[in-house]
């Protein structure tokens, strides 16, 4: 049984506080949904947890089984068992998915079975094995990138996975396979999941234990699975009005991704 404990997490980007005090505990096997308006800081949370450079941590702690992650570089957080499926996966020309995964487990006792694991995982999400040879995320469609991330998660078997809009860009069949694969990981490997999404469809296969409303850089309210469908129809007005979102104070960005 593992535990990811986030306490009072505050972080800034370019001098602007985006995360304003995140408190959250995810245990092995649990699925936590995070839903909230655009620009509320959901992806920032995922990046700060994973250790992406460019964010200033202003306070709080993130512990994985007692180990403080905030002082570790990204690769050591991954080694500790944290996995991030990015909202916008990075294109890495010249590095095939197969090379990446081989390098990731090179030093571990899992290196021998990596080839068969890659093939098995591709099959489980209906992903053509030729994607193993392609340069990472280069010229892949949105949905292919998301399956790429899911395959990595399946092969690497982390303790905790942060899935930032894993459902975006997936067609209904791919969504079903991918969300089922994650659900199975919660059972087979006791994976703990933090799933950021705008759509309750993700939760038809992946059953959330808790749904959190995330607005203005923190969790505003938490509830059961039914909250996901409620939010999808009612929106977030209630929380946006009562909070002071950092994003609202910024000038309008005409190039902002409306789905971000
Ligand atoms: P969400 O994922 O909830 O839509 P994000 O975490 O991506 O929101 O963004 C939260 C706020 O932080 C937004 O106002 C966004 O413009 C801002 N932001 C995020 N990353 C950067 C960055 N690298 N530089 C400047 N502003 C940023
Ligand atoms: Mg986002």
Image: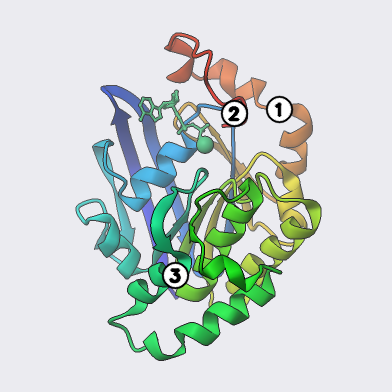
* N-term mark: 3 or 2: 2
Mark 2 and ligand 1: say if the CB distance to the nearest ligand atom is below 8 Å.
Answer: yes
How far separated are the C-alphas under marks 1 and 3? 32 Å
Confirm or reject: label 3 Cβ below 8 Å from ligand 2: no
Residue that appears at 76% across and 28% down = 234
Q: Quadrant of residue 58?
A: top left
Where residue 174 sits in the image (x, y, percent)? 73, 59
Q: Residue at x 30, y 49 (%)?
A: 51
Which quadrant holds residue 168?
Answer: top right
- The residue tagged 2 is 37
C-alpha separation, residue under disc 1 versus residue under disc 2: 8 Å
Whether residue 30 appears in this view of the structure is no
User: Is residue 163 placed above or below 133 in the rendered structure?
Assistant: above
Q: Is residue 83 left or right of residue 194?
A: left
- The kind of secondary structure element at disc 3 is loop
Label 3, label 2: how many angstroms apart (C-alpha)? 28 Å
Task: Choose between 133 and 7: the one closer to the eye.
Answer: 133
> How many numbered tags mark residues here?
3
Residue of label 3: 159
Would you name the residue on which mark 1 appears? Answer: 235
Could you classify mark 1 by the number of other residues whose Cα lies within 10 Å: few (under 14), some (14-19), or many (20 or more)?
Answer: some
Q: Earlier in the sequence, mark 1 or mark 3?
A: 3
For the residues bearing labels 1 and 2, Cβ distance under 8 angstroms:
yes
Q: Quadrant of the C terminus?
A: top right
Q: Quadrant of residue 79?
A: bottom left
| Mark 1, secondary structure of its residue | loop
**Residue at 57% across, 20% down:** 240
Residue 211, horizontal then vertical, whole percent: 63, 47
Mark before the other along the chain sequence, 1 or 2: 2
Q: Decide: marks 3, 2 in contact (CB < 8 A)?
A: no
Residue lying at the far left in this picture: please name it. 71
């Amino acid at each position: 049984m593992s535990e990811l404990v986030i306490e009072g997490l505050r972080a800034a980007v370019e001098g602007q506080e985006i995360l304003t005090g995140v408190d959250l505990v995810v245990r092995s096997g649990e699925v936590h949904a995070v839903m909230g308006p655009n620009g509320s800081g959901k992806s920032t949370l995922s990046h700060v947890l994973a250790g992406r450079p460019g964010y200033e941590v202003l306070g709080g702690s993130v512990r994985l089984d007692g180990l403080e992650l905030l002082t570790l570089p990204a690769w050591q957080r991954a080694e500790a068992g944290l996995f991030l499926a990015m909202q916008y996966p990075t294109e890495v020309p010249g590095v095939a998915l197969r090379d990446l995964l081989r390098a990731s487990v090179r030093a571990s006792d899992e290196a021998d079975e990596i080839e068969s694991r890659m093939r098995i995982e591709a099959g489980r999400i209906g992903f053509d094995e030729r994607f193993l040879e392609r340069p990472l995320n280069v010229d892949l469609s949105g949905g292919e990138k998301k399956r790429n991330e899911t395959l990595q998660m399946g092969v690497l078997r982390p303790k905790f996975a942060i899935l930032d809009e894993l459902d975006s860009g997936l067609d209904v069949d791919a969504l079903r396979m991918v969300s089922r694969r994650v659900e199975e990981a919660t059972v087979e490997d006791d994976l703990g999941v933090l799933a950021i999404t705008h759509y309750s469809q993700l939760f038809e296969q992946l059953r959330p234990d808790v749904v959190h409303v995330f607005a203005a850089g923190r969790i505003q309210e938490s509830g059961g699975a039914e909250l996901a469908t409620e939010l999808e129809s009612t929106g977030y007005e209630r929380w946006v009005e009562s909070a002071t979102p950092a994003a609202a104070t910024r000038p309008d960005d005409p190039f902002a991704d409306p789905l971000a």
